[in-house]
Image (cartoon, rainbow, N blue to C red):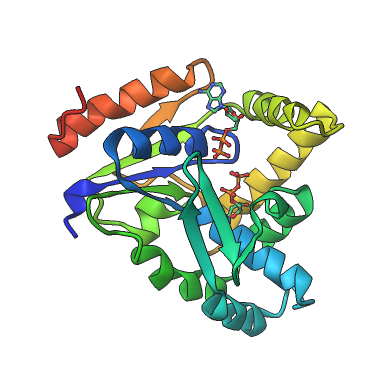
Amino acid sequence: MSISKLITIDGPSGSGKGTVCHVLAKKLNWHLLDSGALYRILAYAALQQKVNLDDKSGLADLALALEVSFVSNGEGVDTLLSGENVGDKLRTEEVGKAASEVASIQEVRSALLARQKAFLQKPGLIADGRDMGTVVFPDAKLKIFLDASAEERAQRRFNQLQGKGFNVSIAQILSEIKERDHRDRNRAVAPLRPADDAFVIDSTTLTVDEVVEQILNLVALKLKISTE
Ligand SMILES: Nc1ncnc2c1ncn2[C@@H]1O[C@H](COP(=O)(O)OP(=O)(O)O)[C@@H](O)[C@H]1O
Ligand SMILES: Nc1ccn([C@H]2C[C@H](O)[C@@H](COP(=O)(O)OP(=O)(O)O)O2)c(=O)n1
């Protein structure tokens, strides 16, 4: 698969990666790798199977054995773990926190590497995560680092959770976002940072459409692919 049909989008929680990646995947008709979902699925499976979150080799074995598939359902994508649709169970704060913990373990990241690389298939791939441009696809020709202020990201999460009927406090979300940012940016392995050749887009004051437009301009410029 040619790396000219690959876009990596990294950034912190709530910067808009998932939303923007879905729009881009649809517009370009390319595959989508939601790498955060893999860490969440592993965390969910570990919590279910009572694998300790500091049992590095146990978690790596679990990561290698996971039977995961992402199946399009027309509107979006169903996330299946051993055939069970676990999509709704992955977005809880408990799973998010555990995902951030297991993601800091080198053995886990190595165990998930080949699985992630295998997503690079025709006609192209949008890869969403924290280390897509730095570790998983370092040769990508177009790398984006999507950022936004912690306050704006907390506000977005708050709106998202409230919309789903959860009773949440914005102060608590902001503190959790800052805690997770700290862990993701300061871990020894694959810390969250822009690749040296990434384009940094700060979406704090941009709409989703404006972010997508900026990326499509870069797609035309760097990958010579027109989406007009
Ligand atoms: N540029 C933007 N402006 C306003 N809201 C946004 C923007 N990008 C994303 N959002 C909203 O913020 C929330 C979190 O976005 P999401 O794509 O889940 O972020 P991430 O995948 O980076 O964690 C979603 O409800 C989304 O609709
Ligand atoms: N490529 C990736 C993707 C996610 N992670 C980690 C970082 C996060 O704390 C968890 C969950 O990621 P996810 O993208 O689902 O989280 P958010 O939606 O941004 O809150 O996994 C990672 O270390 N490397």
User: Residue 51: in sight, yes or no?
Assistant: yes
Report x, y in % for residue 191.
51, 55
Placement of 147 over or under 101, stated as above or below: above
**Is the residue 96 above or below the residue 224 in the image?**
below
Rendered-image quarter of ligand 1: top right
In this image, 124 relative to 36: left or right? left
Q: Which quadrant of the structure image shows residue 113? A: bottom left
Of 188 and 103, nearer the camera is 103
Q: Residue at x 35, y 65 (%)?
A: 117
Q: Is residue 13 left or right of residue 147?
A: right
Q: Is any part of residue 103 visible from this angle?
A: no
Residue appearing at x 40%, y 23% in the figure = 211
Depth check, front residue: 130 or 34: 34
Compared across the picture, whether 16 is left or right of 173 comes to left
Depth order, front residue of 180/18: 18
Q: Which residue is at a point 55% across and 61% down the rendered structure image?
A: 38
Q: Position of residue 78 (x, y in %)?
A: 55, 52
User: From the image, which quarter does the N terminus lie in?
Assistant: bottom left
Could you say where residue 220 lies in the image, as x and y percent from the top left?
18, 29
Residue extending farthest left: 224
Q: Residue at x 47, y 42 (%)?
A: 74
Q: Is residue 157 left or right of residue 136?
A: right
Q: How many marks?
A: 0
Image quarter hosting the C terminus: top left
Image coords of residue 212 (percent x, y) = 37, 25
